[in-house]
Image (tube, rainbow, N blue to C red):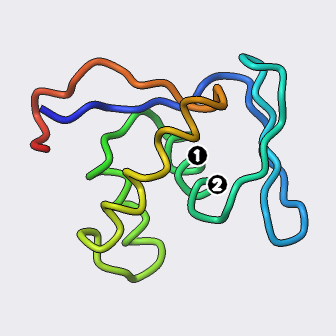
Amino acid sequence: MAPAYGRRDGIAVEPVGDFWAAFSPVSGESILLNDESAAILEVLAEGPATTQQVAAQLALDTGDVAADLHDLVAGCWLTLIDSGLVQQLALDPHVGP
């Protein structure tokens, strides 16, 4: 079973030069994000999703192959969770690992 992730309420994301600034009301701090992490937050604005689902949506948006994006997305979760921007939700029994 794959975990699902959800964007926390009340975050703000704004472009800042070559990066994105994201404010988390959970931590009370702002963090600079790369394009990939900002894109993940954009996908999660539509609702909770698994790594596989986020990679698939990003692939549709970029023309890349979802399987190629899976590891990139998986590598972003820890930073997004630790910064208070995303939370891991219950396991999704309908989606494989």
Residue lying at 10% horizontally and 33% vertically, measured from the top left: 94
Q: Which mark is residue 38?
A: 2
Residue lying at 78% horizontally and 51% vertically, measured from the top left: 32
- Element type at mark 2: helix
Q: Which mark is residue 6?
A: none
Residue lying at 19% horizontally and 35% vertically, measured from the top left: 2
Q: CA distance from mark 1 to mark 2?
A: 5 Å
In the image, residue 43 sits, relative to residue 65, either above or below, namely: above
x and y, in percent, of residue 36 in the image:
57, 62
- Element type at mark 1: helix
x and y, in percent, of residue 39 in the image:
58, 58
Three-letter amino acid code at the position of disc 1: Leu
Query: If the image is split into quadrants, where does the C terminus sit?
Result: top left
61 with respect to 60 (left or right): right
Q: Residues within 10 Å of mark 1 (few under 14, many from 20)?
A: many
x and y, in percent, of residue 58 in the image:
43, 65
37 with respect to 67 (left or right): right
Name the quadrant containing residue 80: top right
Farthest bottom residue in view: 63
Q: Residues within 10 Å of mark 2 (few under 14, many from 20)?
A: many
27 with respect to 57 (left or right): right
Cβ atoms at labels 1 and 2 below 8 Å apart: yes
Three-letter amino acid code at the position of disc 2: Ala
Residue of label 1: 41
In the image, residue 60 sits, relative to residue 78, either above or below, namely: below
x and y, in percent, of residue 3 in the image:
27, 31
